[in-house]
Image: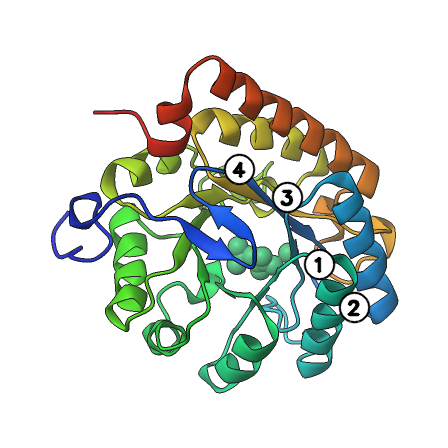
Amino acid sequence: MTNLKLVSLESRERSIVTVGGVRFGGNFVIIAGPCSVESEHQMLATAEAVKEAGADMLRGGAFKPRTSPYAFQGLGLRGLKILARAREATGLPVVTEVLDTRDVSWVAEFADMIQIGARNMQNFALLKEVGKTNRPILLKRGMNSTLAEWLNCAEYILNEGNSNVVLCERGIRSFETYTRNTLDLSAVPAVKELSHLPVITDPTHATGKRSLIGPMSSASVAAGADGILLEVHHRPEEALSDREQALTPSQFSRIVHEVRALRQFQEEAGCGEMVSGGTTP
Ligand code: PEP
Ligand code: MN
């Protein structure tokens, strides 16, 4: 791939991106939390539950990109403040999405990591703006984007001086309608061949189905991902967004056990280089 001066694997050693005390690259990082921050009670209850189950980081959307303008749009600044309280209560770093260049400074102030969602992957003004912050960025793959387009978007961020980027494969659009998207697992080893940046998957948005999230989380470990992002709600039936795909805390806890055990097995079986560094082509 041409013109990937800063993100290509040739340009430097594999990156470790640190968020709070959490290290992406070499470790398997589990990010969990609700789709949206809905209230202080909901966020704190969910945050405590995912911490108890073994999550490394919290997520929760304060600014939500919704298909319909009439759907819940998020609590905005109030949501960011609730996220900060959840971080205080649990000690876990927080990632949250920014939708608008005008909100970048707020989000950078309250969050430990800034998410660029799939719908904004190629919002170049937003990429440049977050590239000017000193916060690590979680860059999701656009649902209709090629690997080259995705990596070029990471290049935009690094080009502004922010080299702390983690990529997130969250499923692409295909002809299949049973699943919400199609998790492109081959993107994980492909990114490892092309770039030094860590890459995680989002089995939640990729499948849109609670029952499929566990298997796709395990598959992500096998593919060599540096982590997963999962949506969990303390009461999924009450969730204001993405209700069908929210895991209960106990479902989440089972997935954590399984992926941690798989990862440990890989390490003990001597697949260390394969799981953390990609296979040698
Ligand atoms: C999200 O993580 O809440 C989200 C909206 O994800 P995506 O941008 O992948 O659809
Ligand atoms: Mn969601």
Q: Secondary structure at mark 3?
A: loop
Sequence-earlier tag: 4 or 1: 4
| Residue 12 higher or lower than 5, as above or below | above
Sequence-earlier tag: 4 or 2: 4
For marks 2 and 1, give the one nearer the viewer.
Answer: 1
Q: Which residue is mark 2?
A: 38
- Decide if ligand 2 comes within 8 Å of the CB at mark 2: no
In the picture, the disc for residue 28 is: 4
Q: Disc 2 versus disc 3: distance between alpha carbons?
A: 20 Å
For marks 1 and 3, give the one nearer the viewer.
Answer: 1
Q: Is residue 205 left or right of residue 45?
A: left
- Type of residue at label 4? Phe
Q: Disc 4 versus disc 2: distance between alpha carbons?
A: 28 Å
Q: Which residue is mark 1?
A: 91
Sequence-earlier tag: 2 or 3: 2
- Decide if ligand 2 comes within 8 Å of the CB at mark 3: no
For marks 4 and 1, give the one nearer the viewer.
Answer: 1
Q: Is residue 237 left or right of residue 4?
A: right
Q: Relative to the observer, which residue lies in front, 66 or 22?
A: 22
Q: Disc 1 versus disc 3: distance between alpha carbons?
A: 29 Å
Q: Quadrant of ligand 2?
A: bottom right
